[in-house]
Image (spheres, rainbow, N blue to C red):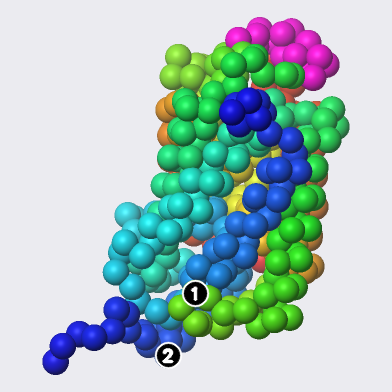
Amino acid sequence: MEFLTQPWPWWTAGIIIGLTVPALLILGNKHFGLSSNFRHICAACLPANIKFFQYDWKKETWNFFFVGGIVAGAAIAAFLLKNPDPIQIHPDLAGDLASYGVTRVEGLVPADLFSWDNLLTLRGLLLMIGGGFLVGFGTRYAGGCTSGHAIMGLSTLQWPSLVATIFFMAGGFLMANLILPYILAL
Amino acid sequence: MANTTSFKVAEPAAATTPETDFEVRSLDTMCVNESHLKHPWWYNLKYSLVGIFFGITFVKAEIISWYRIQEMFRLESFHMYGVIGTAVAVGALSVFLIKKWRIKTIYGEPITFHPKTFNKGQIFGGLLFGFGWAMTGACPGPLFAQVGTGATVILVTILSAIAGTWVYGYFRDRLPH
């Protein structure tokens, strides 16, 4: 049980996530990709005569079931296989965050940034609403996210997915190192 | 007539809605259902089972941790590079073997792959998603998993992501691709 509650090493996670690709293919010719769920929700709830949302989303409901499983699995891990020790954070990151008043480490997301109390602060609005908007807009513009491009796309040796992955990383590096410090200072 | 088969083969999508089919598959070849089979809804529960294993892994390996994503972009930890690198290696080997041995689905359908075409969206959209990834500390899958761990406020982030996707759909024709 000890190894279940301790944080799992990177290779365990990499193998399980990698095996999701053949699992979905063999179970029903389904291609691994999560950001398309945002599109399916748009198509199901508010297609508004936009051509991009005019398709048979009901054919894609398998992906909603997949996401439902992810939520359930995350709850199982967080409540039944809970890691008893505090999360390890690189001292440089912890130090930088402390200088912005982000010190509470209670879960996998910092409660000083992501909580209902902080939602209506400028910092909270930018990170939660602004960040979420960029995730939804950017993934669809790019035609996929980390799962669809970086894992499924690279696994099938598609060079456009390599381009997308490089720019995901470039955007992340720019934000985390150059822009985020200004947001955290708000 | 008695219904003796548990599923029936549906019309290929291309035959009925060619335009929609192009829309879904041209710029977004990934993330779509390639199967032409029609099953009762509960057949989808097997994907939930895969999702449960996936979600447990997300949390236990701290892939959905905001801190791990920051460490990745600040080059302070190898963890996420190891996760993604191993996942791609295992995924690529699996796809290679599926193609080599012509493995079929459990329903006997051939497994199909489609080449993705390049467009400038992979650059502009990629950068924008990268910004959002570093801000929220999560890509789309982990956002859902964060809600599962009890961070209910992330539901707002998910709603905002749905809004972002909708706005992209609305302005899509006017954006460079």
Query: Which label belongs to residue A16?
Result: none
- Which one is in front, A130 or A76? A76
Q: Is residue A113 above or below residue A151?
A: above
In front: mark 2 or mark 1? 1
Q: Main secondary structure of the magenta part?
A: helix
Quarter of image, res B124 = bottom right
Quarter of image, res A107 = top right
In the image, the segment drawn in magenta is A90-104
State yes or no: residue B72 in magenta.
no
Q: Chain of mark 1?
A: B
- Which one is in front, A5 or B159? A5
Residue that mark 2 sits on = B15
Q: Quadrant of the N terminus of chain A?
A: top right
Whether residue B65 is visible:
no
- Which one is in front, A113 or B92? B92
Quarter of image, res B44 = bottom left
Whether residue A24 is visible:
yes
Residue that mark 1 sits on = B106
Q: Residue furthest left?
A: B1
Mark 2 falls on what kind of element?
Answer: helix
Q: The residue under label 1 is which amino acid type?
A: Ile
Residue lying at 41% horizontally and 47% vertically, measured from the top left: A68
Q: Is residue A118 left or right of residue B90?
A: left
Residue lying at 56% horizontally and 47% vertically, measured from the top left: B54
Residue lying at 60% horizontally and 40% vertically, measured from the top left: B57
Mark 1 falls on what kind of element?
Answer: loop
**Residue A172's spot in the image, x, y percent?**
74, 39
The reply to whether label 2 and label 1 mark residues of one chain is: yes
**Residue A180's spot in the image, x, y percent?**
72, 26
**Residue A95's spot in the image, x, y percent?**
78, 11
Q: The residue under label 2 is which amino acid type?
A: Ala
Q: Is residue A49 above or below residue B161?
A: below
